[in-house]
Image: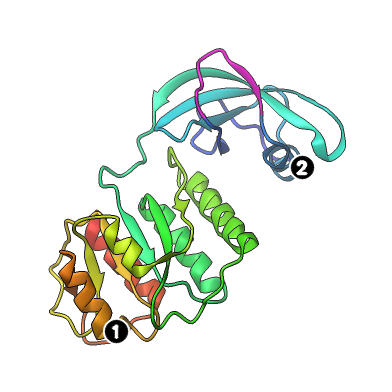
Amino acid sequence: MGQPALEKGSVNSPRVYVDPPLQEGQKLPLDPSTSHHLMRVLRLNVGQIITVCDGQGNDYRATLLPPRGNGRQQQVWVELGSCQPNKAEHPVSLHVGVAPISGERFERMLEQLAELGAVSVTPLLTERTNVRQISEPKLQRWRRVATEASQLAGRGSPLRIGAPMRLVQFLQSHDEGCLLHQLSPPAPSTFEYSHLAIGPEGGFTNAEVALAGGRGWHSWSLGPRNLRVETAALVGAVKALH
C-alpha cells in the first residue's frame, strides 16, 4: 500500500538539502541518491510537495516534476515555489569536538546532537582516544546519519561533520571554550560557550587540561559520576543551547 499524499504545506513534507544559490521558480534536478529515496522509499508522486533547503536558513516549497533518466541514474526534478526563513535553527552556533567511540553509540549521539541544534561535530584525536583511524567511508556514513537526522528535525541546514582533528588544533580554532573534565570544578547550570570539547572514555589527561587552560579555555565537571562520551556530549550541548 502506497504512502498517503502529502498536502501542500504539511509539516510531514520530506526535506532535502541542495547547494545554493536557489531562487523561486527555478527548476533543478536532485541527485540520484535523493531521487531514489523520494521515489523508491517514500514512493512520492509527481505533483507532491517537498521542502528544499539551501543550507543557509531558507526553505523552499517545491513541487515534484517528472523524473528524467533511467535506472540508478534516474533523477527527480523539482520546481521551487515560495521561500521562507527556516525557524528550526538555534540562535546559538555550537561546535562540538568529541573523541570518537566505536559502534553505533557515536552515530546515535550524532543524531541527537543534530536534533538539539549543534552546528558541527569534529572527531577529536586525544592522548587516550581509542579510535585512531577514521576512514573516509566512515566519515561519509557519519555525514549521512547527521544529514538524515537534521532533515527529520526540520532544520534549515544539516549538522556538519568535520575531518578528524587533534585536540590542540581544535583548541586553536577558538579563543575560548569549554572542556569537560571530571576532576574539574562543577559546571554551572548553563554555559555561554560556542565550542565544547569532550574527551574519550578515559578522559583528558592533566597535560591536555593544562593545555586548554593555557589557551583560554575553561574546564568544568558534569558531576561525580563517570559519564559515557555520548552522555557528556549531550549534557554539555543542552547546557550550551538551553
Q: Residues within 10 Å of mark 2 (few under 14, many from 20)?
A: few
Tag 1 secondary structure: loop
**What secondary structure characterizes most of the magenta part?**
loop
Q: 204 or 68, which lies in front? A: 204
- Asked if residue 25 lies in the magenta stretch, the reply is yes
The extreme right residue here reads 70
Tag 2 secondary structure: helix
User: Residue at left 44%, top 40%?
Assistant: 157
x and y percent of residue 97 in the render? 36, 64
x and y percent of residue 166 in the render? 40, 68
Indicate the quadrant containing the C terminus: top left, top right, bottom left or bottom right: bottom left
Instruction: Read off the magenta span.
Output: 20-29
Give me the disc on residue 219: none
Tell me the kind of residue under disc 1: Thr
x and y percent of residue 8 in the render? 55, 25
User: Residue at left 43%, top 37%?
Assistant: 156
Indicate the quadrant containing the N terminus: top left, top right, bottom left or bottom right: top right
Task: Report which residue position mark 1 lands on.
Answer: 205
Left or right: 222, with 89 as reference point:
left
- Asked if residue 59 lies in the magenta stretch, the reply is no
The extreme top residue here reads 25
User: Residue at left 56%, top 37%?
Assistant: 16
State how far apart marks 2 and 1 are (Cα).
49 Å
Tell me the kind of residue under disc 2: Arg
Q: Residues within 10 Å of mark 1 (few under 14, many from 20)?
A: some
Above or below for 159 versus 209: above
Q: 109 or 130, which lies in front? A: 130
Left or right: 201, with 139 as reference point:
left
Earlier residue among tags 2 and 1? 2
Task: Report which residue position mark 2 lands on.
Answer: 40
